[in-house]
């Protein structure tokens, strides 16, 4: 395989890693936001 | 994640894949620089995003000084953080390119020197933030520092490289005010700039969202 294809594949793998990580973070933050909203509601009801 | 709300994130993922493929398979190498010139599709957008994020940091710092809302400080600090990361990426990619063309990773070329000083200036911004404990004082002083730091950005990014003789290839818009680039290279380059800009927006939103949630959690604990 020519060098340029090796560099192309490496760049695509790096991008796949960055994209997956951002996607994962996004999902985790949304889940955490839901839990936080729930906790805040509970706090309001208690008070 | 829902498709309707997050379509632009999927599109960014696909767009950047096309940019990477285009950078290696569609765009021709620049005359005289060979295959190494393909780094322009990643190195310049990194520098562009760094400049944009420092600008956004300065805008939010200005807004904070006019109306001291904690959220403005979060936006300013988050933007500067991402800007510092992209400045490091621009420095590393430039250094890799220099090692192939100039046979040395670092030459203290005007471009290299100016980005190094910029790195130090924004690293000092975070040193300043970590040195102050009171939230309001930290936000106020770092807002003033961010504004002063941004005044230097146009000098280091746009003026110094055009004033001093440098081995660095001409900027995209050269001294005659013209774009001297192959049409296919320009297409991939502009697509890359757009992709990196959206990527920056996504990262900034994530960072700000994470900081806001951390503060909410801390408030709930109290």
Image (cartoon, coloured by chain):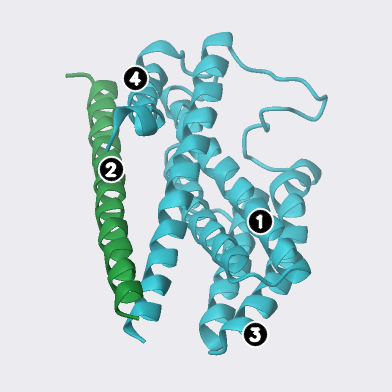
Query: Residue shown at 41%/29% (left/top)?
Result: B8
Query: Residue shown at 47%/18% (left/top)?
Result: B29
Query: Residue shown at 68%/71% (left/top)?
Result: B143
Q: Which one is earlier in the sequence, the residue at label 3 or at label 1? A: 1
Q: CA distance from mark 3 to mark 1?
A: 30 Å
> Which chain gets the green colouring?
A
Describe the element under mark 4 as helix, strand or loop: helix
Mark 1 and mark 2 residues within 8 Å of each other at the beta carbon: no
Q: Quick check: do tags 1 and 4 share a chain?
A: yes
Q: Mark 4 highlights which residue?
A: B21
Q: Position of residue A44 (x, y in %)?
A: 35, 73
Q: CA distance from mark 4 to mark 2?
A: 21 Å
Which chain is mark 2 on? A
Q: How many marks?
A: 4
Describe the element under mark 2 as helix, strand or loop: helix
- Eye-nearest disc, 3 or 1: 3
Disc 1 packing (10 Å; few <14; some 14–19; many ≥20): many
Disc 4 packing (10 Å; few <14; some 14–19; many ≥20): some
Q: Mark 2 highlights which residue?
A: A23
- The colour chain B appears in is cyan
Describe the element under mark 3 as helix, strand or loop: helix
Q: Mark 1 highlights which residue?
A: B114
Describe the element under mark 1 as helix, strand or loop: helix
**In this picture, is B143 found above or below B76?**
below
Q: Quadrant of the C terminus of chain B?
A: bottom left
**In this picture, is A15 found above or below B29?**
below
Residue B165 seen in the figure: yes
């Amino acid at each position: 395989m020519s060098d340029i294809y090796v560099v192309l594949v490496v760049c695509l793998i790096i991008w796949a890693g960055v994209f997956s990580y951002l996607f994962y973070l996004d999902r985790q933050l949304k889940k955490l936001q839901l839990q936080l909203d729930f906790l805040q509601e509970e706090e309001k009801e208690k008070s | 994640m829902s498709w309707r709300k997050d379509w632009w994130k999927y599109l960014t993922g696909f767009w950047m894949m096309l940019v990477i493929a285009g950078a290696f398979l569609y765009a021709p190498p620049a005359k005289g620089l060979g295959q190494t010139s393909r780094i322009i599709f990643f190195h310049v957008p990194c520098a562009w995003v760094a400049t944009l994020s420092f600008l956004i940091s300065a805008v939010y710092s200005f807004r904070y000084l006019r109306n001291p809302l904690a959220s403005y400080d979060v936006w300013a600090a988050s933007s500067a953080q991402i800007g510092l990361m992209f400045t490091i990426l621009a420095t590393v990619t430039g250094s890799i390119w220099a090692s192939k063309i100039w046979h040395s990773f670092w030459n203290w070329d005007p471009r290299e020197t100016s980005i190094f000083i910029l790195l130090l200036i924004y690293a000092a911004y975070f040193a300043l933030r970590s040195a102050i404990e009171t939230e309001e004082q930290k936000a106020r002083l770092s807002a003033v520092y961010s504004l002063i730091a941004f005044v230097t950005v146009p000098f280091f990014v746009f003026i110094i490289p055009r004033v001093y003789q440098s081995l660095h290839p001409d900027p995209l818009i050269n001294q005659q005010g013209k774009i001297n680039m192959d049409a296919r290279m320009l297409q991939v380059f502009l697509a890359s700039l757009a992709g990196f800009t959206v990527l920056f927006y996504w990262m900034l939103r994530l960072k700000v969202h994470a900081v806001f949630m951390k503060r909410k959690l801390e408030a709930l604990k109290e």
